[in-house]
Amino acid sequence: MLFFVYVSSFFPESSAKELEGLANVSIVDKSLNVAIVESDADLCSIVRKKKPVFIYGVFPLRTKGRISKGDYLGSIYRQMLKAMRAGKVGRDETVFLECYDINNRTRYSAKDIEVSLGQRLNSDGYKADIIDPTAFVYAVLLNGVCYAGTSEFDYEWQRRLNPLRRYMGTRKVSRAEFKIREAFEEFGISGNGIAIDLGAAPGGWSLFLHKRGYKVIAVDPAKLDYAAMKSAGARVITLPPGGDVAKSIKRCDVLHIKAGFDDALRMIPKTCATLIADDMNLGPLASAAAVLEFVPTLTPHASLVLTVKCMSRNAPKFMREAKHALSGSFEVKSIKALPSNRQEVTLFASRSGSVKASKTAHDWKKCGVP
């Protein structure tokens, strides 16, 4: 059986090794961050069970065929119909269409193709519907070939097939907002209370956390994008060193401690935060060391979202460093290369054990931490 596999483009060796370790597979075609593979195993079930780090999603394919240059849209439509017949998608179902155009470089955008396919479906008596679909039909266009598949409609599948596209035009402050959003979705994070955002500037993570129901303490000596945050409905207060955090946090959505970590640690009350987030541009040991300094400000079951920056393509090495540095104070639940990550992975953990910092963590003050 054929499968469409979407992997991290920043760690090709790790992605390939992880894919080969799942089952006996042979690569039919590939591009930078996608592969068409053949396998007798049920790769979808295996990925759901094993939760790999570098593989975003696996989707079964039912048909493949060359795309005609003379009848570009028609040839794609015919492959889609073949896939629908193979998947027993009838005219009594409502169909959600998704086209993933990887590298065909034509005058048609993926959206153009989807609109054309939907119109043709409706003309042939089928029902294309994005509001209340029952069937999911997807076409992958790669190196002049159309691969098509179907499934019962599931928003999770649709999200994973083309995860970046649904965020287009939604950011308010910075691209980093997509990373924290994906982390919450991937790891199933939910909660409320107070969140600490380390190295918060320009404020994208803080704004997202506010929208998820947290009161946010943003720690960074640099400015946040106050105008963008205000336009998105967040009330922001800036607090200088020595200010009253407990009093100020009640009057705002995002409290910006515009100071270094030393001052922030003296200002933030003990055991007040239910989540701590860190997307600082530091190596994994330095980031872990900074997080560990703030452990006394966390509740016993607080969560951690940490972007592990990888200084080379050897991601497993940096993942091990981060996990080891956090051990004793946090239990790492999952690590995942998310679609919006670049040369980095995202770690999700929860408080565990004692409050002491790991002996392997570097002195955070010597690592460029403010």
Image: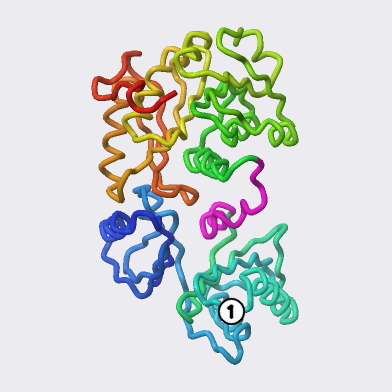
Q: Position of residue 16 (x, y in %)?
A: 30, 60
Residue 290 vs residue 273, the one in the foreground: 290
112 shown above or below 245: below
Badge 1 is on which residue? 106
Q: Position of residue 333 (x, y in %)?
A: 38, 34
Check the image and report above or below for 266 versus 170: above
| Residue 71 position by quadrant | bottom right
Q: In the image, is residue 171 part of the stretch drawn in magenta?
A: yes
Nearest the camera: 122 or 172? 172
The amino acid type, in three-letter code, at marker 1 is: Thr
Question: Who's the residue at 65% across and 71% down the image?
Answer: 114
Residue range in magenta is 155-172
- Counting from the top left corner in percent of width and height, residue 218 is at 56, 24
**Element under label 1?**
loop
Residue that extends furthest to the bottom in the rendered view of this protein:
70
- Residue 351 is left or right of residue 166, and the answer is left
Colour theme: rainbow
Estimate the x, y position of residue 227 in percent, counting from the top left. Answer: 72, 33
Identify the residue at horizontal 61%, vertical 35% (top origin). Answer: 208
Q: Quadrant of the N terminus?
A: bottom left
Above or below, comparing residue 111 to residue 198 in the picture:
below
Image quadrant containing the C terminus? top left
Which residue is painted at 27% across and 61% down in the image? 20
